[in-house]
Amino acid sequence: AVISAMSVGFARGAVEEALAADHDVLVEVEVKGAKQIRERMPESVSVIVLPPSFDTLGRRLRERASDTEEVIQKRLEIAREQIREAGDYSYVLINEDLERAVADLERIISVARLRPQHVLPDWWNRSEVD
């Protein structure tokens, strides 16, 4: 299962190698990167992580105290555009409580492992079916 969230790029060769070895792969990419993954690998599972609300996002950015208000406004504008694409993802994870968000992500990974393209090839290899 390939899970894509948001933020950084990744080495495609390393991902393909891990998938070939039947490993789960978690990549963190921006919204554009996630779209490219979904287009190139339609079997992938994509997850977008959202704050509980847009107001909460603004508050969290301001509490970090690492950006000017101008930068925060620009980031919120970009986030608003990206959030509009949330319906394109396999799952939407709301990050209100970190422990719950992690547990939700673990459940998503568990469910992804049960998809036919993940389970059936191994099942057929172990089965003697004429």
Image (cartoon, rainbow, N blue to C red):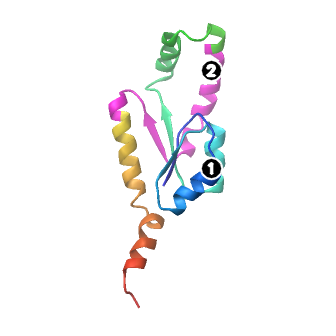
Residue at image point 53% right, 56% down: 18
| Cα distance between the residues tagged 1 and 2 | 23 Å
Camera sees residue 98: yes
Residue at image point 64% right, 51% down: 12
* 124 inside magenta stretch: no
**Mark seen at residue 75:** 2
Looking at the figure, which quarter contains the C terminus?
A: bottom left
SS for callout 1: helix
SS assignment for the magenta stretch, majority: helix
Kindly check if marks 1 and 2 are in contact, taking CB atoms under 8 A apart as contact.
no
SS for callout 2: helix
Q: Earlier in the sequence, mark 1 or mark 2?
A: 1
Q: Amino acid at mark 1?
A: Ile
Residue range highlighted in magenta: 72-100
x, y (%) of residue 57? 50, 20
**Where is mark 1, residue-wise?**
37
x, y (%) of residue 3? 50, 47
Q: Amino acid at mark 2?
A: Arg
Q: Is residue 85 left or right of residue 127?
A: right
Image-quadrant location for residue 33: top right
